[in-house]
């Protein structure tokens, strides 16, 4: 990191003459950022950093944004900073590649950044701005300089080139959030405790985060409406699932940073594949469509919503039978949500409804009580996965939290989570009557735990059979 980086140029780039290089280095007007610019959520960041520092007194904490990943040859995947880095800094843009937040033992945060490229003038990076395909301002856009970044974040900044010397300098107890930046992984061991604390600090959302999540849910609602409106065209397309994926993703990209995870568009039996992202099927108007999608805001918060819709606009009797059982399971799960309830309660309540329904249908040959026992769980052949998770900057948020604070923990006001029971009746499952085979239903909503219960954030999208049919009818005219 201490040597000037070689320029990232392409083999098809033409050589640059010294005369052109000198000419490129002069004659540019100053273009400072407005002095009032601040990161989104600026006021909430200091408390987060202080809570992190308080968890590790006297230690240096290193939280990287991450590095680019090559997609192929000289093309990289689009960059998104690690959620912990975004949560601590408010810096969310693609220009955060390689940047690192260090919290010093006294608690002072310092951002190690690659500043805006200088323009000529003998700097080792003097031609980067117009020649470097990865970092050049004329190739990928402007980055803030160090003073501007300090103004944006309220955090002291230093040049990224100084970081390696700092980390190799006088010994300070240091913890690294590992697995994010391979350059730092080569210098320091990963620290699992830092990773779990960073996840656990994010379990309860502050007021601004709840606002961002509501924005994400609202944009996602609009994206679902777009998908319903696009059905007539998609039904005619040989790969209608892809058409609908593109429809949702257009909204996500136009209004937010993109999607929070790959959009799932599953027609008919594809809905029995939990994460069907191939989306290469045609739409059969007599079947259901499962759409599981979320818009990620520019602040990087994502919704995670699923609706299962009749492509004809009306549920058939058997589709309705399956749908209403899943809906009853979801209602039972949602009814358990409140501070102090155990995280597993909503899952247990929903799964009891499903097990009873499957037993009533004669699909389960044992009683619901028996099927619910830990040494049985036979109903899970038809539900496959657990029915919810924390939601936030990551769709499966806070994933490194310890079991005692998450899976085996209790709910707290300000937590945001999904409740998403499903029934996945595989097309080749010989334990099922023929009419049930190939039906997959998931209903997924986003909720915030309040002082005495939970608020449904995604209630603008109907869930009942009648509500969905009416909503589709209105959108389709
Ligand atoms: N979309 C992934 C999930 O529902 O967890
Ligand atoms: Mn989910
Ligand atoms: Mn989902």
Image (tube, rainbow, N blue to C red):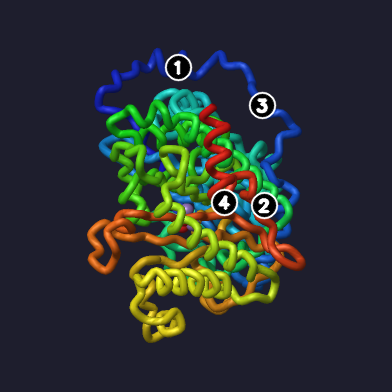
User: In terms of sequence position, does the residue under pointer 3 or pointer 4 come before the other?
Assistant: 3
Q: Nearer the viewer, mark 4 or mark 2?
A: 4
Q: Nearer the viewer, mark 1 or mark 3?
A: 3
Asked whether 16 or 358 is in front, the reply is 358
Q: Nearer the viewer, mark 2 or mark 1?
A: 2
Which residue is depicted at the point 40% across and 14% down?
Answer: 20
Residue 164 visible, this orientation: no
Label 4 vs label 2: CA separation? 29 Å
Neighbours of disc 4 within 10 Å: few (<14), some (14-19), many (20+)? some
Instruction: Tell me the tag on residue 209.
Output: 2
Q: Position of residue 85 (x, y in %)?
A: 56, 53
Which residue is depicted at the point 54% across and 27% down?
Answer: 477
Asked whether 227 or 311 is in front, the reply is 311
Label 2 vs label 1: CA separation? 48 Å
User: In terms of sequence position, does the residue under pointer 2 or pointer 1 come before the other?
Assistant: 1
Which residue is depicted at the point 60% across and 35% down?
Answer: 145
Give the residue pinned by disc 3: 32
Q: Position of residue 248 (x, y in %)?
A: 47, 36
Give the residue pinned by disc 4: 464
Mark 4 sits near ligand 3, with its Cβ under 8 Å away: no
Q: Position of residue 446 (x, y in %)?
A: 59, 55
Give the residue pinned by disc 1: 22
Secondary structure found at label 2: helix
Which residue is depicted at the point 70% across and 46% down?
Answer: 41
Q: Nearer the viewer, mark 3 or mark 2?
A: 2
User: In terms of sequence position, does the residue under pointer 4 or pointer 2 come before the other?
Assistant: 2
Q: Position of residue 453 (x, y in %)?
A: 71, 66
In this picture, residue 91 sits left or right of residue 282: right
User: In terms of sequence position, does the residue under pointer 3 or pointer 2 come before the other?
Assistant: 3
Asked whether 157 or 216 is in front, the reply is 216
Secondary structure found at label 3: loop
Secondary structure found at label 1: helix
């Amino acid at each position: 990191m201490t040597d000037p980086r070689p320029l990232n140029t392409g083999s098809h780039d033409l050589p640059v003459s010294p005369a052109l290089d000198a000419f490129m280095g002069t004659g540019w007007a100053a273009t400072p950022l407005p002095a009032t610019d601040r990161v989104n959520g600026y006021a909430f960041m200091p408390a987060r950093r202080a809570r992190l520092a308080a968890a590790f007194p006297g230690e240096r904490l290193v939280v990287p944004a991450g590095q680019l990943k090559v997609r192929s040859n000289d093309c990289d995947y689009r960059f998104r900073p690690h959620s912990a880095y975004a949560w601590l800094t408010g810096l969310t843009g693609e220009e955060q590649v390689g940047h690192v937040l260090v919290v010093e033992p006294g608690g002072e945060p310092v951002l190690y950044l690659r500043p805006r490229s200088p323009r000529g003038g003998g700097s080792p990076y003097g031609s980067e701005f117009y020649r470097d395909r990865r970092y050049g301002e004329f190739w990928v856009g402007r980055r803030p300089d160090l003073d501007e970044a300090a103004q944006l974040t309220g955090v002291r900044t230093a040049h990224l080139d100084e970081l390696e010397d700092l980390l190799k300098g006088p010994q300070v107890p240091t913890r690294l959030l590992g697995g994010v930046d391979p350059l730092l992984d080569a210098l320091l061991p990963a620290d699992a405790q830092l990773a779990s604390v960073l996840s656990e600090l994010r379990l309860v959302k502050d007021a601004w985060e709840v606002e961002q999540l509501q924005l994400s849910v609202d944009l996602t609602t609009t994206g679902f409406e777009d998908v319903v409106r696009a059905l007539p065209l998609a039904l005619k397309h040989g790969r209608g699932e892809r058409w609908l994926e593109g429809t949702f993703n257009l909204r996500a990209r136009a209004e937010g940073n993109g999607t929070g995870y790959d959009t799932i568009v599953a027609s008919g039996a594809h809905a029995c594949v939990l994460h069907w992202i191939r989306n290469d099927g045609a739409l059969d108007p007599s079947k259901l469509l499962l759409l599981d999608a979320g818009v990620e805001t520019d602040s990087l918060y994502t919704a995670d919503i699923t609706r299962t819709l009749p492509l004809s606009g009306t549920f058939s009797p058997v589709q309705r039978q399956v749908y209403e059982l899943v809906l009853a399971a979801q209602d039972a799960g949602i009814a358990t949500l409140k501070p102090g309830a155990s995280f597993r309660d909503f899952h247990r309540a929903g799964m009891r409804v499903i097990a009873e329904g499957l037993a009533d249908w004669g699909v389960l040959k044992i009683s619901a009580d028996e099927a619910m026992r830990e040494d049985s769980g036979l109903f899970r052949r038809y539900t496959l996965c657990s029915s919810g998770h924390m939601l936030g900057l990551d769709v499966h948020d806070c994933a490194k939290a310890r079991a005692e604070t998450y899976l085996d923990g209790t709910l707290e006001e300000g937590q945001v989570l999904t409740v998403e029971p499903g029934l996945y009746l595989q097309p080749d499952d010989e334990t099922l009557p023929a009419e049930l085979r190939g039906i997959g239903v998931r209903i997924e909503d986003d909720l915030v735990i309040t002082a005495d219960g939970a608020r449904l954030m995604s209630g603008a999208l109907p869930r009942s059979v009648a509500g969905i049919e009416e909503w589709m009818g209105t959108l389709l005219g």
